[in-house]
Amino acid sequence: MVQQRVKHHEWPRKYMLSLLALAALLTTLVVTGKTVSAHPAHSAYSAHTNQVSRASRAFNFSDAIFAWTTTATNVSGDSTVIDNAVTNGNPNAVLLVAHNLNPDPEEGNPCQCIYNNIPVGVWYNASIQRWEIFNEDLSAMTVGLTFNVAAWSAPFTDTTNGRLVYTHVAGASSGTDYTDIFNSMSNKNPNANVLVTPVWNPASSGTEVLNDHPVGVWYHTQFRGGTGHWSIFNEDGATMPTNAAFNVYVSSGNAVNGWSGTVLVSTSSNTVSNYAIMSTGLSNVPGFLWVTPDYDPGACTNSLYCNVIYTMCAGQPFCDVMFNHNVGVWFDGYGDSSGWHGELSVYTEDASTMPVNVAFNVLEITV
């Protein structure tokens, strides 16, 4: 059931810290992102902070890219507290997150493979001036999970390469399961790569809304005079609550400066058990991956990043498929002195069989 709940009513101890307790908390918070493999081909990583910054210019569209692992010291209730220079003390930051099942695929480091079959979002804890990743159903956050995080210090537009990130807030509920988004890079553009992460309390609106449902995106022309646009919707058909908010990533192109926009479609040839394998030229390295199901993909024009080629959704078997599952990403393989061996994949968090003909918008960053 959709809830609009003031989170500090659930855990008042998080918001009534004494100065001494707050100081202790800030002292114990450390950069707990998973240590990234020191493979020679991937030296763009920082072994100390596990992030790639805009200062390096290798990836000039985000302020920080890192993996964040939940530990006993950074988990509180339903949330894990992020400690990162870009997001600390910054309620205007925009974060994109994805659960990474196998963040350290070096030979000898077996996958812990801890599932998290819960919709996750982000929120800003003003009491400690930190962003947190949380379970939308307010259940306790599991220790040992790792999340891929892309963080921007503020909404950001890259007009040169046709990309942007911002926070979308739904208007008053119309009783439907979706909210329309409008921006210059996705309007009238069925080729856009659109990904989202729910945010509970965006600074831009001052609202606090939970949306405990798996979400997807779709491109359509309904109710807007035939003008094509994208929408965010609840995969289970639940009504989109008033003021539900989402951080949105949009790319009007496919691959720029290491950022690759991909449309992955599950097929009988690339689906195994509960996951679909990314059959692309970039999928043999771990990298960072984020994913959002796409109900009605419009087009994919670059064969390097698509395992199918199509121009319009009408009549295609992989269109109009509801996918009421939480999803995560993983590298099914390992790295050794000779390189990486394996494939990037998208999987169902409930371990159910991955159905065929489901489309996913995927953002991949390789280093």
Image (cartoon, rainbow, N blue to C red):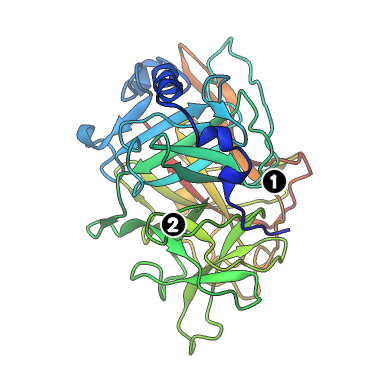
From the top left corner, tell me how far across and down residue 103 is, in percent: 53, 25
**Element carrying mark 2:** strand
Identify the residue at the far bottom of this view.
225
Q: Earlier in the sequence, mark 2 or mark 1?
A: 2
Q: Quadrant of the C terminus?
A: top left
Q: Amino acid at mark 1?
A: Ser
Q: Decide if residue 302 is on the left or right side of residue 89.
A: right
Q: Is residue 302 visible?
A: yes
Q: Which residue is mark 1?
A: 269
Considering the numbered disc 1 on the image, is that residue within a helix, a strand or a loop? loop
Front residue (pair 94, 207): 207
For disc 2, the neighbor class at 10 Å (few under 14, some 14 to 19, many from 20) is many
Spatial CA span between label 2 and label 1? 31 Å
Camera-side residue of 52 and 281:
52
Compared with 361, 20 (above or below) is above
Q: Is residue 333 above or below residue 250?
A: above
| Number of marks in the rendered image | 2
Specify the quadrant that holds the N terminus.
bottom right
